[in-house]
Every structure is written in C-alpha cells, then in structure tokens.
C-alpha cells in the first residue's frame, strides 16, 4: 500500500474560537500534513492555527448509537435555565 | 455542469411502497431534508452514483487546471499572472475537497485517479477545448466557471453531508473565478484596442456552444436524473440550469460589446427568458467519447504528472517510515 495516509484537519479561525474540523487530506507525515493543510484550507486567511490527526486514530460513535447516547437528554428539560420561572419582582437573573 | 450524464443503475424510480424498510426510512430522511453522513446506512445505488458523480466532479477540477495553466507563463502583466496562479491553485484545492468527499464513501483516491488515467472515469467535456489566446482565460472564468456556479450553488443543499460541505467551500471561492474572468474581458473589450475586442469575439465564438453543452443533454425523460433528483444529489434539470445561464449571461455579453454566436438567440417576452438555437449534440458525444480537440493531450498531461511525481511520493513515504521506525526503536 503506497498511498499516503489520510489526515483530518482542524483549523482555529481568527476569532479565538476552538479548532474546527474543516476536511481531510493525504500526506506522508504530520509535518507535511500541516504544510498541505495550510495550502488547501487556509488560502484566504481562514485560520491562525492548524491541528492534524491521522484519520485512523479517530474513534467515533456509531450512527446506530445515536438513540441510546443522545435521546436521554431530551427528557431533562430542567437542565436548561429557561425551565425555571423566576418571579418578576426578583428581576434579571 | 462539471458532472455530466451520471448513471445511477436505476431502471425506474421506486415509490415508497415498493421500497424495503431500510430504503423507505432512508428516502423519508432525504425527503425531510436530513443530511446523510458517510457511516450511515445507504442504498448501494446511492453510494455508487455519488462516487461516480463526485469523482467526475473532482477530475474536472483537476483536468480543468490544464487549459488555464497554458497561460500562466504568458499572462500580460504580473498582476494577471498572480491572479491566474491563485485561480489555478484554487482548482487543485477544489479537486482535493471533492476527492476527500468521495473517499468517505469507501473508495481510495488512488483508485479514483487510476479510473481517470485509464479513461474509465470521465471529466467535463469543456476541458477538451484549447486555449488559443489570452481572452480564452477571461472567457473560461466568465463562462465556464459561471456555468459551474449555476450547478454548484444548488448542490450546496444536496443530501450527502461531505459533498454538500465541499460545495459550500467551493462556491465561496468560485465567485472570485468568475469575476476575475469578467474583469479581464472588461479590460480587453471596453478599455482595450479594436484588436483586443476582436480577440475576445473570436474567443466567445469558440467557447459559447461548448459552455452550453456543459449542462449536458436534455434530461427531462432520463430515469437516472429522476433517481438522482429523488435522492437530492441533483437539484435542477439540465435544461432549467442552461436556460438560467443563458438569461444571466446575455446581458453581460452585451455590456462587453460581444456578439453571441447564435442567430436564433432572441428575447421571448412570454417566457421571460431567451430562446436560443439548437446545440450540436453530435459534437458533444464525440468529445465525451474522447474525440475532442484536446482529449489525448489532457489525459497524457495528467498521466505524465502522476508518473513523474512517483519518485517524490515514494521518497516522502520512505522518509516518513524511516522516521517512525527510528522513533519506535528509541
């Protein structure tokens, strides 16, 4: 197998945000992956920092697990501040 | 359109009743506008058709660099040269975004390139025409990228997540391509010499019809198109997009003072659009078959670039492996 491995690219935008997944690319090693990511994903000033990680190192939840993982939070409306009515006399909280 | 005549393996479009439970759940998600992501269940036909469509699109971006690259060393000013370099670099980037989107469907980039190099996979017919004068570079930006945008803007809403995201990224950059082309033509046609205007007229004479062919033959009765539309990987019919393109482009040509090489072109008040002449589909099919003016040259250039780069790809990989081995041993 002589294809360069696949890397996932994460870029931090200009505004102090967290790194965000932008896409992937092939590169022989991490250093070249960062160089290529700069050319492929930041040609128009889209970032101030790059992370790359080899795709095979990413562990992901399976689409089939969506229900068991995320459905339980649907019934926990009390986790949102809007669940609670604060008396008007108290003012902003 | 960068992907032309993509086959779906469908003989007819199934109704919800004819589908099995998985297919029905899948179609209902698409109908509800929910994006499909790579690891989720999908019909084999959907996967295969998308691989064909996205890879054809990617190949078009990559081969599309060649006609324009012809003028990088001949650009009239340093500024035009820098702009053209940036544009051609963008096309390489667009190809990469799309190959990556295709790879999420379980095919490797090397396999896709092999299909291009062996002639098994197609790319857009438009890139088999030569760039004979400087106005051609402007014409490609204005007409060819203009036609591509017509097709790509709706594809931002397509049902497959990675393809949709690649399209969003591409569309953001594509507007620069069209505008730099039109700007180069404004310079030649409105601020240039009579000879430059003549050069631009010669250019539109050669590019107008091939640009209209980019949208592909009428697909009003095509099962493949109906299936692709049901899957939301094709949003508009070929004729619909072509009409929109003509309506948008004619006034822009008038501003430049260029004559569109179609004696049948005229405004139709009733439909609120232009009527235009019959397209020579024989020419289109010949180009698709490999008999266009530059098919052999384009493919040969791609294969040569791939073969000539082998030592580089292998060298960097060998270096990376050696470094990894040294790290593991330490």
Image (cartoon, coloured by chain):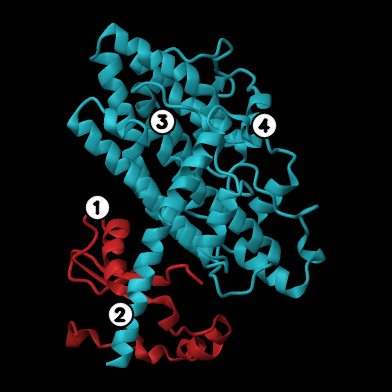
Crowding around mark 1 (Cα neighbors within 10 Å: few <14, some 14 to 19, many 20+) is: few
Report the Cα–Cα distance between label 3 and label 1.
22 Å
Q: Nearer the viewer, residue B322 or B260?
A: B322
Question: Which residue is the site of mark 1?
Answer: A44
SS at mark 3 in the image: helix
Q: Are marks 3 and 1 in contact (CB under 8 Å)?
A: no
Do the dots labelled 1 and 2 sit on one chain? no
Q: Chain of mark 1?
A: A
Q: Which mark is residue B140?
A: 3
Question: Which residue is the site of mark 2?
Answer: B323
Say which colour chain B has.
Answer: cyan
SS at mark 4 in the image: helix
Q: Chain of mark 3?
A: B
Q: Is residue B213 left or right of residue B185?
A: right
Q: Say above or below: B99 vs B299.
A: below
Q: Is residue B159 visible?
A: no
Report the Cα–Cα distance between label 3 and label 4.
21 Å
Give coordinates of residue B250: x percent, y percent. Answer: 45, 21
Q: Is residue B76 left or right of residue B127?
A: left
Residue mark closest to the camera, 1 vs 2: 2
Q: Residue at left 28%, top 40%?
A: B85
Q: Are marks 4 and 2 in contact (CB under 8 Å)?
A: no
Report the Cα–Cα distance between label 4 and label 1.
38 Å
Give coordinates of residue B119: x percent, y percent. Answer: 61, 46
Question: Which residue is the site of mark 4?
Answer: B285
Identify by letter the chain in red. Answer: A
Give coordinates of residue B162: x percent, y percent. Answer: 48, 63
């Amino acid at each position: 197998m002589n294809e360069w491995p696949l890397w996932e690219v994460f870029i931090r935008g200009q505004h102090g945000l967290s790194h965000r997944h932008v896409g992937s690319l092939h590169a022989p090693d991490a250093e070249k992956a960062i160089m290529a990511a700069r050319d492929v994903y930041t040609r128009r000033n889209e970032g101030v920092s790059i992370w790359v990680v080899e795709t095979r190192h990413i562990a992901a939840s399976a689409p089939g697990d969506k229900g068991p993982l995320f459905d339980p939070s649907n019934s926990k409306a009390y986790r949102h501040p809007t669940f609670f009515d604060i008396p008007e006399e108290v003012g902003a909280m | 359109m960068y992907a032309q005549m993509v086959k779906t393996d469908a003989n007819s479009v199934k109704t919800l009743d004819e589908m099995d439970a998985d297919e029905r759940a899948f179609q209902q998600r698409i109908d509800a506008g929910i994006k499909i992501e790579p690891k989720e269940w999908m019909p084999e036909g959907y996967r295969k058709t998308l691989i064909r469509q996205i890879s054809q699109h990617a190949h078009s971006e990559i081969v599309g660099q060649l006609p324009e690259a012809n003028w990088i060393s001949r650009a009239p000013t340093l500024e035009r040269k820098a702009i053209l370099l940036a544009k051609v670099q963008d096309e390489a980037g667009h190809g990469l975004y799309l190959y990556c989107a295709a790879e999420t469907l379980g095919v490797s980039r090397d396999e896709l390139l092999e299909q291009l190099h062996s002639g098994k996979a197609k790319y857009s017919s438009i890139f088999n025409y030569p760039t004979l004068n400087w106005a051609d570079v402007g014409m490609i930006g204005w007409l060819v990228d203009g036609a591509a945008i017509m097709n790509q803007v709706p594809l931002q809403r397509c049902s497959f997540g990675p393809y949709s995201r690649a399209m969003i990224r591409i569309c953001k950059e594509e507007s620069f391509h069209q505008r730099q082309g039109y700007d180069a033509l404004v310079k030649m046609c409105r601020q240039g010499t009579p000879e430059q205007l003549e050069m631009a007229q010669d250019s539109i004479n050669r590019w107008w019809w091939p640009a209209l062919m980019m949208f592909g033959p009428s697909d009003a009765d095509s099962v493949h198109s109906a299936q692709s539309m049901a899957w939301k990987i094709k949003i508009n019919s070929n004729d619909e997009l072509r009409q929109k393109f003509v309506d948008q482009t004619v006034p822009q040509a008038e501003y430049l003072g260029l004559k569109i090489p179609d004696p049948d072109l005229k405004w139709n008040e009733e439909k609120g659009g232009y009527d235009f002449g019959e397209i020579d589909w024989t020419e289109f099919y010949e180009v698709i078959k490999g008999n266009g003016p530059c098919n052999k040259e384009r493919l040969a250039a791609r294969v040569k670039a791939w073969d000539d780069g082998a030592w580089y790809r292998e060298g960097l990989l060998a270096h990376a492996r050696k470094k990894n081995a040294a790290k593991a041993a330490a």
